Image (cartoon, rainbow, N blue to C red):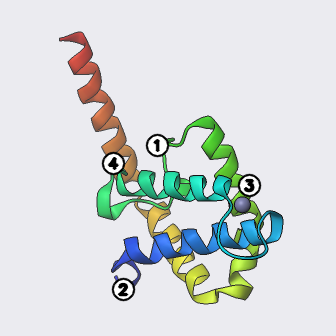
Amino acid sequence: MFFLKNREEREIRTLKTMIRMYCKAKHHPEGYLCDSCAEVLSYAAMKYHRCMFGKNKPVCSVCPVHCYNHVMRKRIREIMRFSGPRMIFNHPVMAIEHLLVQRWSKKNMPLFLKRVRGKQKRNSNLKSA
Ligand SMILES: [Zn+2]
């Protein structure tokens, strides 16, 4: 499916755009990101690259795995809550691409859950051995 091609590049770009939008309104109107938002961006990009689902990851908002720590989860959610509704007006292509991947993620949720349970099972086997 076309919207799954070169996802990584496009999704990291979307992530940057959304964090930038938030930082511009709340912290740094000029220039690039403030230190705090730059930290969120590099954390989120690191998590994206290390996702256990690899290239076929679900979108983070519907993912069954909670890989963000508590603090970062709170910060990214605040950013998404602010920038999310503004994306459809400011960056409609990015917004629609995201909706398509989100729909695809929901449709494939049984596969993601199966994969998560498989991993947990392997881990518990390791522990009991
Ligand atoms: Zn900021």
61 left or right of 124 in image: right
Residue on which disc 3 sits: 78
Mark in front: 4 vs 2: 4
Q: Is disc 3 in contact with disc 4, using a CB cutoff of under 8 Å? A: no
Q: Is disc 4 in contact with disc 2, using a CB cutoff of under 8 Å? A: no
Gap in angstroms between the C-alphas marked 1 and 2: 25 Å
Three-letter code for the amino acid on which mark 4 is drawn: Met
- x then y, percent, for residue 118: 28, 37
Residue drawn at 44 percent across, 51 percent down = 47
Residue on which disc 4 sits: 52
* First in residue order: circle 4 vs circle 1: 4
127 left or right of 12 in image: left
Residue 6 visible? The answer is yes
Mark in front: 2 vs 3: 3
Residue drawn at 33 percent across, 80 percent down = 5
Gap in angstroms between the C-alphas marked 4 and 1: 9 Å
Question: Could you say whether the residue bearing mark 2 is in a helix, strand or loop?
Answer: helix
Gap in angstroms between the C-alphas marked 3 and 4: 24 Å
* First in residue order: circle 2 vs circle 3: 2
Residue drawn at 76 percent across, 68 percent down = 28
Gap in angstroms between the C-alphas marked 3 and 1: 19 Å
Say which quadrant the C terminus sits in.
Answer: top left
Residue on which disc 2 sits: 2
- 28 above or below 124? below
Q: In which quarter of the image is ligand 1?
A: bottom right
Three-letter code for the amino acid on which mark 3 is drawn: Glu
Three-letter code for the amino acid on which mark 1 is drawn: Val
The numbered mark at residue 65 is 1
Q: What is the residue that sits farthest to the front in this orientation?
A: 31
